[in-house]
Image: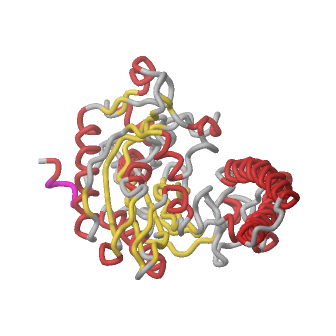
């Protein structure tokens, strides 16, 4: 959540930063109205409280001297009633501001490029050169069906569209991938964790999926529980409402989980194949850091995800997201896009984001900084989306006869 004190202190600066994220001007106007109303109500309340304190002090002094306090007593009584009424009104204004603030995105860093959408993202660099095929490369959908690896029809039969059954060597390859990814991340200093694939509402509120993205979540009927859209939710909320010691930072975690998303906003996109699924496996990176260390850790997380793809021999590129394409909670994001030869283009396979103190303020994750408690910075990133990595291997390692070569680093995981 954005800093409400900063909002009250310098609304125009905050509003200008939010416009970089293409925030709706009507929402900004509503935010300004609520901020101004709350600020004025709070100032009036403080003035009445100060008056009450002065009247009470005067009342005590007169009474101690045996003077007549009749008129003053009535004024004290009336002012006390006014304080209570204004306190209630101020609380209501604060609650309304808090509720709206939960739907306001994080402020983007100054370094984030200007832009409206993904077309304005800025390429940082390319890693590895895409293979030149001496035959027409097939799409993973066709390769998977021909090999008996991917069964889309039975996925629909078991659930509905955008669910896929991985058969035989595809299932083994998936298992090999998440084991390889976890081992790789552990070698880079990330502690492996196993977390539930279900999270409560407080956890999703803490990382920012609720309340704004409730329609994208699979909710469990009759429970305040949801299937997780990413293990970022679980890993970050391990420390919700906790105060860490400065010496514990950074906390660097990795986990494999299934992830579940309705993808309500993507109807008609990538309906063929496994690019966009309702259920998918993902290995996640999450870091809890000292604010002064978060940029360094961000670079380490980007390198970890990129180097993993390099180890797999998959061409990819790093892209800095512009303001208009930046996620709700992110202050800055580097996307990693892997090469798909059948589409002759790069597709996102990882997003690494520095969220600064946005989630920490919602989830109350702090560390002891001398005599005071300070909000940590949280970071998250895919390392990697397992299904997309699998189909990227299928396409990039396909042979002319339709078979798939296995990357050398995975051979030991498939024995």
Q: Residue 188 vs residue 2: left or right?
A: left
- Residue 337 in sight in this render: no
**Residue 189 rendering spot, x and y as whole percentages:** 26, 70
- Give the main secondary structure, helix, strand or loop, of the magenta stretch: helix
Queried whether the magenta region covers residue 284, the answer comes back as: no
Residue at 49% over, 44% down: 202
Q: What percent of the width, then of the height, locates residue 388?
A: 42, 48
Taking the spot 68% from the left edge, 73% from the top edge, the residue there is: 113
Choose between 30 and 156: the one closer to the eye: 30
In the image, residue 203 above or below residue 59 = above
Is residue 173 among the parts visible in the rendering?
yes
Q: Quadrant of residue 143?
A: top left
| Residue at the image point whose x is 75% and y is 50% from the top | 84
| Quarter of the picture holding the N terminus | bottom right
* Residue 286 percent coordinates (x, y): 39, 61
Q: Tell me which residue sits at (61%, 57%) in the image.
A: 327
* Residue 107 x %, y %: 66, 67
Q: Nearer the viewer, residue 98 or 40?
A: 40
Q: Is residue 197 left or right of residue 201?
A: left
For this rendering, which residue is in front, 192 or 397? Answer: 192
The residues colored magenta run 407-412
């Amino acid at each position: 959540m954005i800093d409400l004190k900063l909002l009250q202190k310098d609304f125009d600066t905050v509003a200008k930063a939010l416009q970089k994220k293409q925030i709706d001007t009507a929402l900004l106007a509503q935010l300004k109205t609520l901020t101004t109303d709350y600020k004025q109500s709070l100032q009036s309340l403080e003035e009445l409280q100060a008056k009450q304190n002065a009247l009470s002090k005067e009342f005590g002094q007169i009474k101690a001297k045996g003077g007549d306090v009749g008129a003053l007593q009535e004024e004290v009584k009336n002012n006390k009633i006014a304080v209570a009424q204004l306190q209630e009104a101020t609380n209501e204004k604060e609650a309304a501001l808090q509720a709206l603030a939960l739907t306001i995105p994080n402020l983007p860093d100054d370094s984030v490029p200007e832009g409206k959408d993904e077309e304005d993202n800025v390429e940082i660099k390319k890693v590895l050169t895409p293979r030149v095929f001496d035959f027409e490369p097939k799409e993973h959908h066709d390769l998977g069906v021909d090999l008996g690896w991917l069964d889309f029809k039975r996925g629909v039969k078991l659930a509905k569209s955008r669910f896929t059954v991985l058969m035989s060597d595809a299932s083994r390859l998936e298992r090999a991938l998440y084991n390889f990814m976890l081992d790789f991340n552990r070698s880079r200093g990330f502690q492996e964790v196993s977390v539930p694939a279900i999270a409560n509402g407080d956890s999703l509120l803490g990382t920012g999926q609720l309340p704004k993205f409730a329609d994208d979540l699979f909710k469990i009927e009759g429970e305040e529980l949801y299937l997780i859209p990413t293990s970022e939710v679980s890993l970050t909320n391990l420390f919700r409402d906790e105060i860490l010691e400065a010496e514990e930072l950074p906390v660097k975690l990795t986990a494999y989980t299934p992830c579940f998303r309705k993808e309500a906003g993507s109807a008609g996109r990538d309906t063929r194949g496994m690019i966009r699924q309702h259920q998918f496996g993902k290995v996640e990176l999450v870091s809890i850091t000292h604010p002064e260390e978060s940029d360094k850790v961000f670079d380490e997380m980007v390198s970890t995800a990129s180097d993993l793809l390099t180890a797999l021999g998959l061409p990819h590129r790093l892209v800095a997201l512009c303001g208009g394409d930046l996620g709700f909670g992110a202050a800055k994001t580097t996307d990693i896009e892997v090469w798909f030869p059948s589409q002759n283009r790069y597709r996102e396979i990882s997003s690494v984001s520095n969220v600064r103190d946005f989630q920490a303020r919602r989830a109350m994750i702090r560390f002891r900084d001398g005599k005071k408690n300070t909000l940590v910075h949280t970071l998250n990133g895919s390392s990697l989306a397992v299904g997309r990595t699998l189909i990227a291997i299928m396409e990039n390692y396909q042979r002319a006869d339709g078979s798939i070569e296995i990357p050398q680093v995975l051979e030991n995981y498939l024995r």
